[in-house]
Amino acid sequence: MKNSIAVIAASLTLTGFASIGCTNSASDKVATAQENVTQAKTDLDKANADYLADVENYRKESSEKIAANEKSIAEFNERISNEKAEARVAYKKKIADLEKKNTDMKKRLDDYKTDSKDDWQKFKAEFNHDMDELGNAFRDLTVKNVK
């Protein structure tokens, strides 16, 4: 009888220690998980802020390029006023095409919604390519080909 009481007491003591050990371990795990969630949220907030800053900087830079294109168009219009009528008509048509492309680029930039980073990277790559082509077209127009 003494042995069975001692065995039961020992079992209860070991169970109590095991429960306390598991409780501490579980609470530690919960605390660690909460810290990880807090850190992940902080990292996500920082990444989103960086993404939005990138979008805003890119929009500003692109708007400046578009404004420079508009200035080039105005300057070129002034320069061609001294050209022959035939040349002026041809230049006016080219200028109108470039103005339309420039306006379309501005509209594309203004209409872009910041939905996802993957879409942003694709948009940015396509927009850069199109802006480079437009810039080359402006340079080609302003170069005077003398024969």
Image (spheres, helix red, strand yellow):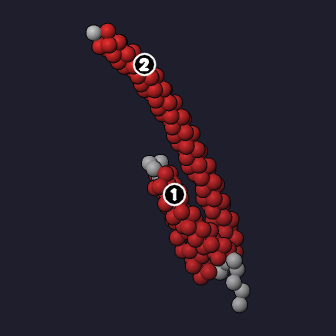
Q: Quadrant of the C terminus?
A: bottom right
Q: Is residue 116 visible?
A: yes
Q: Residue at x 32, y 13 (%)?
A: 3
| Image depth: mark 1 or mark 2 in front | 2
Return the x and y of residue 124 as percentages of the image width and height: 53, 59
Q: Secondary structure at mark 1?
A: helix
Which of the numbered marks, if any, corresponds to residue 47?
A: none
The three-letter amino acid code for the residue at tag 2 is: Phe
Q: Quadrant of the N terminus?
A: top left
Q: Which residue extends farthest left?
A: 1
The three-letter amino acid code for the residue at tag 1 is: Gln
Is there CB contact under 8 Å for labels 1 and 2? no
Quadrant of res 22: top left
Q: Is residue 7 above or below residue 42?
A: above
Q: Depth check: give the residue in front, 45 or 66.
A: 45
Which residue in the protein does label 2 denote?
17
Return the x and y of residue 37 as percentages of the image width and height: 48, 33
The crowd level at tag 2 (other Cα within 10 Å; few <14, some 14-19, many 20+) is: few
Which of the numbered marks, if any, corresponds to residue 121?
A: 1
Quadrant of res 131: bottom right
Return the x and y of residue 50 as percentages of the image width and height: 58, 44
Point out the tag, 1 or 2, that comes first from the N-terminus: 2
Q: Secondary structure at mark 2?
A: helix
Return the x and y of residue 5 as percentages of the image width and height: 31, 10
Q: Residue at x 55, y 39 (%)?
A: 43
Q: Depth check: give the residue in front, 35 or 12.
A: 12
Q: Is residue 42 above or below residue 83?
A: above
Q: Depth check: give the residue in front, 40 or 80.
A: 40
Q: Residue at x 54, y 74 (%)?
A: 93
The crowd level at tag 1 (other Cα within 10 Å; few <14, some 14-19, many 20+) is: few
Q: State the separation of the CA atoms marked 1 and 2.
A: 56 Å
